[in-house]
Amino acid sequence: MDFEFDENQRMLRESFREFLDKEIGPLVDAQEKKGPMTKEEAISLMRRFRKVGIGFDLESMREMGSDPLGIAILVEELFRVWPSAAGLLGLSFPTALVNFAPVEMRERLMPKLEANELIGCYAITEPEAGSDNRAMRTTAVLDGDHYTVNGTKTWITNGPVSDLCLLVANDQNGQRIFLLVDKEESPYETSELHKLGWRAGPTGEIFFSDCRVPKGNNMMEMVSSMLSGRGAEVTGDGVDMAGLAKSGFMSMLGRMSPENIIFAFLRSGMGLAGSGIAQAALDASIKFAQERMQFGRPIGKFQLIQEMLYNMKALTVTSRLLSYQALQMAINGNPEARLMSSLAKGYACDAAVKVTYDGIQLHGGMGLSDEYPLERYFRDARMLTIPDGTSEIQKLVVGRELLGSGFTAYA
């Protein structure tokens, strides 16, 4: 199996690194110390990414979608530089559904989508339903041409600044349903939550009280419309059906629930987030070990320092390879994508905590100072082990997939 990037992928990585170093890197420290981005600051940041073709309009998705591994490269590089920005951009993925939304919504929101000024969020977690998401209490009851939504979602990335919410709820039959909620036509309330890491990234609660959502905003109906031949009407110039099939998305729909498909991609991406943050800590630690003098010589000459760097490098590389493999399996619609994405997420996120911990230790007192980035790397890495399934839940998912459904530990 070839794990090398091809020439185009290498060029993509280098050009994106140059963009991040010039346009994004200088913003990080001040914004992280300031706290969660406002709506205006979030939009301003997303506009910067639109300059390099990153967005969720069809043009951007076609360009990026021609090489899904290229998207993964962007994810890892962005987490290496600024996890808060990666969360803002990545968790806006529900805005892509605007391309296939009912006509009125599409016409109203498409200009913002094309300008990368539309912010989305994915809402599944609730105050009483975290790891056990089967305990969700949010309901979406069909009433004529609308669903009436009631419930509370919490720890939602982008929630306080969101325009759109991909909501997971239970319908009147107790079945899981996915609704694209447009805040303009179906108002919901939000509140800010503050957290250990990703401090510039807005995170909060969302409150739905008799929120009326059009029936046509059901995600599965949108997908059905897109695949039934009405895609040309939906998008204006058709949908690349061959590309969709090649991506494995349709193959996965036949094997996994929409929720598990989303989690397979999110968890693979979280694995790459871990390797990205770990790489940043490793790079900083190598530089510090070369320059820091103690006992009359660079600390990099001490055996224990070299052992620490060895372990940091091994964990980082292993995390990266495992995450790319899991992502490739998800792209191909491999039924083992659920197992591998959970393995990648659990391993890589725990590894990032270890790598950044050692990075702080290697830096000594400097590692505790907010004048150096190591303490932020550690806080940002620690954030990874909870969202999209805790490390413990990933172990149970992998155990169940290995042993069979009769061995589910959380039934």
Image (cartoon, rainbow, N blue to C red):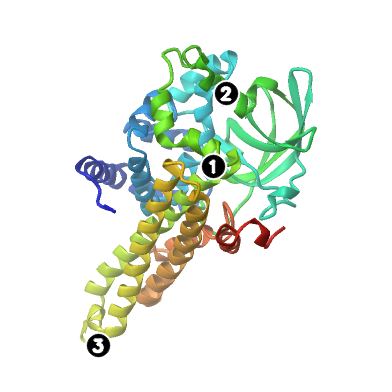
Q: Where is residue 111 in the image (x, y as percent from the top left)?
A: 47, 19
Label 1, residues with CA under 10 Å away: few <14, some 14-19, many ≥20: some
Q: Which label was assigned to residue 295?
A: 3
In-front residue for pair 15/265: 265
* Amino acid marked by disc 3: Phe
Using the rendered view, name the quadrant where residue 14 is placed.
Answer: top left
In-front residue for pair 321/30: 321
Quarter of the image where the C terminus is located: bottom right
* Amino acid marked by disc 2: Ser
Q: Where is residue 355 in the image (x, y as percent from the top left)?
A: 40, 68
Which residue corresponds to the image point at 44% horizontal and 61% vertical from the top-left?
348
3 vs 2, front mark: 2
Which residue corresponds to the image point at 47% horizontal and 61% vertical from the top-left?
349
* Amino acid marked by disc 1: Ile
Cα–Cα span, label 2 and label 1: 17 Å
Instruction: Mark 3 or mark 2: name the one nearer the start of the chain.
Output: 2
**Is residue 265 visible from the viewing direction of this image?**
yes
In-front residue for pair 240/214: 240
Q: Where is residue 325 in the image (x, y as percent from the top left)?
A: 38, 52
Label 3, residues with CA under 10 Å away: few <14, some 14-19, many ≥20: few
Q: Which label was assigned to residue 262?
A: 1
Compared across the picture, whether 337 is left or right of 285 comes to right
Cα–Cα span, label 3 and label 2: 68 Å
Helix, strand or loop under label 2:
helix
Name the residue beneath numbered marker 2.
224
Instruction: Mark 2 or mark 1: name the one nearer the start of the chain.
Output: 2
Residue 108 lies, with reference to residue 332, above or below; the image says above
Q: Position of residue 361 (x, y in %)?
A: 40, 76
Q: Which label was assigned to residue 47?
A: none
**Is residue 200 visible from the viewing direction of this image?**
no
Instruction: Mark 3 or mark 1: name the one nearer the start of the chain.
Output: 1
